[in-house]
Amino acid sequence: MTLRIGFIGVGGIAQHHMLQLKEIPEAQIVLVYDVNREAAEQTAAGLGARAAGSPDEVLDKSRVDAVYVCVPPFAREELEVTAARRGIPFFVEKPLGVDLELVRRKAEVIRESGVLHAVGYVLRYYDTVQMAKDYLQNKPYHLVQASRLGGSHPSKWWKQLDLSGGNLVDAATHQVDLLRYVGGEFKEVFASFGQTAIHQLDPDATIYDSGSLSFTMQSGAVGSLTESCMSTIHPGNEVRVYGSDFFLELSGNGRTLLIKDAGGEQTWTSEKNAFLEQARAFLQAVSSGSRELILCDYEDGLKTLEFTLAANRSGLERRVVELT
Ligand SMILES: NC(=O)c1ccc[n+]([C@@H]2O[C@H](COP(=O)([O-])OP(=O)(O)OC[C@H]3O[C@@H](n4cnc5c(N)ncnc54)[C@H](O)[C@@H]3O)[C@@H](O)[C@H]2O)c1
């Protein structure tokens, strides 16, 4: 059975998703749209697809069986809502947006529509992340340390706080989401952000270059997260969970799992391509109608966004922000 796929946005991440779809024989990309018409036409030509004149043309059930929404968060407008209302299964990239009220409104429509969909928190698709989640089931922990240190995204929009939300909302969101996924929900957050290095990269940047978050989990555990998009000299990312009788660390964006406990110390590195696993799960769900394989839906992605935007608010208002 062939699945006709449409793309809205053909930038960096869209190209990466398209590479995965090449590995899935049923997937056929038929329509692509981008505000950059030339990029859309070039991409379409390379795929044997057609460049659409508008996003509306892609969101047409007679033309596509599913759509990938890969434009930046500020540019999503009502795309997912339109897909939902028209009954078109969609995959949307993380983070879900930068305007919390808009994302909450969209979540409601998507929930009511019952449309099949998935959100691109791709690290959940590593088997090592599943192992960590299983290990932590009913295992109390008291402390968490997380970090996301590295470089910045090449696009101009990414360095504007109102368009991307900054490194925390757009990139460290993966570590925040990992923590929620394996360790449960957040309760409150206090954040400080710095902006001393980013202008070396882009004099017009309004994002922070570094952040330091202190938070509590609903379980009562406490934790911290540090992030920087100006640390190319020493990149890395970890989610570390400390229990009184174990230590667990997910590093390499979830790919490597380390567990120390009474049984000794063991490390596993995933052989999986999480992006391919994610694409397979979404397309299998589209063809079967079963959502079992989809590991993140809109409501779930919204919770991760609520935390990162709460941290941004905390930094701005210099106060602890409670998650509702
Ligand atoms: N899951 C991951 O690991 C991962 C990795 C990278 C990016 N992303 C996410 O993917 C999204 C896009 O990021 P990217 O790296 O592809 O960005 P990008 O800047 O490389 O590409 C964005 C594309 O969207 C297009 N675009 C911009 N505004 C548009 C609009 N109003 N309508 C239609 N097209 C528009 C641009 O022309 C460009 O082709 C972001 O939300 C980002 O966080 C996820």
Image (cartoon, helix red, strand yellow):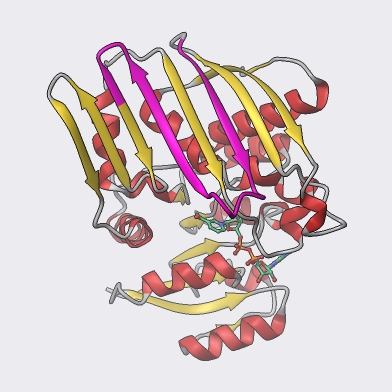
The percent position of residue 34, horizontal first and vertical second, equals 67, 74
Question: Which of these two is toward me, 301 or 151?
Answer: 151
Query: Residue 225 location in percent, x, y?
Result: 56, 30
Q: Does residue 99 belong to the magenta stretch? A: no
| Identity of the residue drawn at 36% across and 15% down | 141
Residue 60 appears in the figure = no
Tell me, yes or no, whether the highlighted magenta stretch contains residue 237: yes
Quarter containing the C terminus: top right
Vertical order, 250 against 142 (above or below): below
Residue 214 in the figure: left or right of residue 219: right
Residue 233 as seen in the image, left or right of residue 136: right
Looking at the image, how many numbered discs can be counted on the residues? 0
Q: Is residue 205 left or right of residue 284?
A: right
Give the quadrant of ligand 1: bottom right
Q: Nearer the viewer, residue 17 or 158?
A: 158
Residue 9 is situated, as x and y percent measured from the top left of the image, at 62, 68
Relative to 88, is 290 above or below? above
* Extreme-top residue of the structure: 220
Percent from the top left, x then y, of residue 130?
Answer: 27, 39
Specify the segment rendered in magenta. Answer: 221-247
Q: Residue at x 49, y 57 (%)?
A: 90
Magenta residues: mostly which secondary structure?
strand
User: Farthest residue in the left direction?
Assistant: 263
State the image quarter where residue 169 is shown. Answer: top right
Residue 305 in view of the camera: yes
User: Which residue is the extreme one toward the right?
Assistant: 204
